[in-house]
Image (cartoon, rainbow, N blue to C red):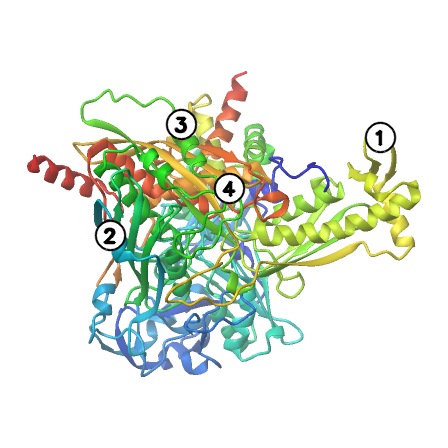
Amino acid sequence: MEEYKIQLTVNNEKISAAAKAEESLLKFLRRNGFTEVKCGCEKGDCGSCTVIMNGKTIKSCITLAIQANGKEILTAKGLEKIEIGRKLQESFVQHGAVQCGFCTAGMLMAAKGYLDTNPKPDKAEIRKAISGNLCRCTGYKKIVEAIYDVAVGDQK
Amino acid sequence: MSEFKVVGKAIPRHDAWAKVRGELKYADDFTLPGMLYAKVCRSKYPAAKLISIDISKAKSLKGVKAVLTARDVPRNETVTKFGQSTDVKGGFEGLYRVLAEEGKKIRFVGEPTALVAAETEEIAERACDLIEIKYELLPGVFDPEEAMKPNAYLVGEKDSNIVNEFGCLTGDIEKGFAESEVIIEDRFEIPFIDHAYLEPEAGISWLDDYGTINIRVCSQVIEHFRDVAEVLNLPHNKVRYIGTMIGGGFGGKEDITVESFIALLTLKTKKPVRLVYTREESLMAHSKKHAFIEKYKIGAKKNGEIIALEAHYIGNAGAYTYLSPWVGLYATVSATGPYKIPNVKIKTQMVLTNNVFSSAFRGFGSNQANIGYESMIDELAIKLNMDPLEIRKINCMHTGDALSTTKQVLKTYVALPEAAEKAWAGLGEPTVSKEENIKIGRGIAMGQMSYGRMTFLRDSSRCYVKLETDGSLIVRSGIPDLGGGQASLLSQIAANELGVPMEKVKIYNTDSMLTPLAGTTTATRQTYMSGNAALKAAREVRNRILNKAAEVLNVNPDKLDIVSEKVVVKYDESEYLPLTEAIQACNAAGIELYSEAQFNAPFTGIPDLTNIKGMTFPDFTFGAQAVEVAVDIETGQVKVLKIVSCYDIGKALNPACVEGQMEGGSIQGIGYALSEDFAIEKGIPQTPSLAEYLIPTAVDSPEVKTIMIESGGGLGPYGAKGIGEPSFNNIVPAILNAIYDATGVRIRQLPATAEKIIRDLKKNFFKK
């Protein structure tokens, strides 16, 4: 299998590494230590691997690593350095929106990506925005409330 | 007892920050230098005789380090256990076969046939493809009713496909029906469903310097170290489980998944071996919730009083026994629900078929029973033109009554019909449909579900609590945390008893050799069992602190409490001793500031399985769910508008966690009712991905309203009851009853898809 040298930025850290032609961004990131990006299905069905690439929310399992060449990637570990990221983390913790936590990192990225495009959503819009991210534990209520409270807080 | 300082508060659990920061390591996040990648070769056929396996080509592939078949497994056939330390025997332990054996039968698609360890995942996969297996295809049997017939194809090596039969007899069933003024009969079919946790099964194993096999894995049962040791033919103390935080379990990680495979490969190669299932493999290879066929007949008086109930359950166990007997028992005991019925006859048969094996799933057999009896009572109400809540009230058990099946007396508060009334009222004003094709309907269901294991399993849990010299607190427990906050809860209890803030508690958990075994995180048992063990251990340490502080302060220990890291004189908190000074005083006097305590559940003998009577569970959680749905009668599409979930949880030790269970349980129930169907056609699974196996998304899910009744009557610490599984009860029949209310369509074959509803609507239309 052919290998390509790719360069990308992950959470402001410059990464330069070889990627196989057919390697997914998910596998590439996990192989390079970004294990916060979770592998739940590898088919784009569950959303556990959601990251933000150049401002756009994507599922890294159905994105090729070489497509990320020259791009900026944000994962859950990079959220702390961003105001809205910190607020989302705090809100998820305070609302009890985290149970097993396997969907959480992806869910946070979907929430961050959505609030960037629509800072004042209602709860129905939030539900739609995270509908590509499955959670089996919480029933979504506390997740939606956690995101909504961040949005409402910003409106004040 | 100390007052509530930490317990009863919705405080964030200890692992929440690590999870939102992406720092928490799950089972597939661990790697070790020089590790190998494992793959499992699996059968493509549901029924066949395994003639021979040729591994020579696979073995000679560059980068392949080991290829194992059943011949290489020291003990390939043992029995399925799930953490119990006492043997029950009597047909309860099924066959655990690690790999398919030459000359024997293949029983399901996905049955493991060989194992590979290689330098990369790709090589391991290629090696699997190079393994040559000769099969003699056999017809198989897929339907449990077919499988029960004489001369049916035999799934396994035994001369019958019936694994177990259970029964319950109360009163005189013939007389009951003879005296009935109304009799209704019905049949329900409930499909296999999958746990669909977000984290696929994963683990890594390695040999340490002393030849011990270490396994880091996401398992609900670290006591499986014994079972893996049996497979490897090693002493139990040479296999160690280190449990990781689990990315959801719901019963699907109760049986052994990857562990035997990686342990065998590590033993063979002496290298670390890692195995992570793909989603497709996870769906295909792990257990399912039992599909059930249920035949119900109930007889009642015209005033709604039920006087006879007969139920026949046929549970589809799939290819291997696993926990089928226990699931059958749960269903049998639960079959009459929370109703006082004088004449009862229950028969349950668990049957092998050539489908993927069934085992534990949140709710065990209680859910399947609950779907049956709560649909039937609704049908009875309609037949008698009665209010659905009213008919439930008339027949409801009360505190001190006995279950109509086993006659086990209900000693704690029976929060029924209270929970049903509250849930029903909680729906509020009815939604008014603005469109002619959208019909609104409401449904209710109520019931009981056990917490804690069946009492003849003789369950126990242990916990260790220690006060450090700086006043920080150490808790050690074997408790696996599925995401429900099980480990955090023990910290909360210890913190509460010892007057220490949560931030100063550190729990070390889930190591089969270094933490006291706490039993399985299954059966809604951890709050009850390990919670009590933690409380017992913490109170022992607390009493030693109080006794010593009493000497220093020269007061009676009864007058003391520990509040905010101070030993205070109650009602006069100006007089106190800092906790660290009390600790110093104890240490200087040689007083132990640690304790390891064991909590035992009530123990009973094995009942007569043809007529189960007496105590089989420690206690039950009672509750109800009420639902409002909108059904589009042009498309058959159902939208759940409102859910109210009301349970007596005894005491909410962490209300946020209890709500989380209740909300999550309800939404999982939407999937069970409306979309989830692990369909298997002639043994071939039809839903190999999450694009085909549909679990609820955020847009499918309404905001669940939760109502907690805190009776304080539970057997858990501070009067708590378990909620994990009970919260998944009632929701499915409540939705089905609401669909009936909206449309007049009674769904008897789950799930209630749009196609089924529209088909029945058309039938009803032409009937008119």
Nearest to N terminus: mark 3 or mark 1: 3
Residue depth check, mark 1 versus mark 4: number of the one nearer the observer: 1
Mark 4 neighbour class, 10 Å CA radius: few under 14, some 14 to 19, many 20 or more: many
Q: Are marks 1 and 4 on the same chain?
A: no
Where A4 sits versus B557, above or below?
Answer: below
| x then y, percent, for residue B456 | 51, 64
Q: Secondary structure at mark 3?
A: helix
Nearest to N terminus: mark 1 or mark 2: 2
Q: Secondary structure at mark 1?
A: strand
* Quarter residue B656 falls in: top right
Identity of the residue drawn at 21% across and 47% down? B184
Give the letter of the chain under mark 2.
Answer: B
Q: Are marks 3 and 1 on the same chain?
A: yes
* Quarter residue B57 falls in: bottom left
The residue where tag 3 is placed is: B425
Identity of the residue drawn at 35% across and 41% down? B670
Give the letter of the chain under mark 3.
Answer: B
Give the letter of the chain under mark 1.
Answer: B
Disc 2 vs disc 4: Cβ atoms closer than 8 Å? no
Give the letter of the chain under mark 4.
Answer: A
**Kind of residue indicated by mark 3:** Ala
| x then y, percent, for residue B691 | 31, 47
Mark 1 neighbour class, 10 Å CA radius: few under 14, some 14 to 19, many 20 or more: few
Picture quarter with the N terminus of chain B:
top right
The residue where tag 1 is placed is: B572
Q: Secondary structure at mark 4?
A: helix
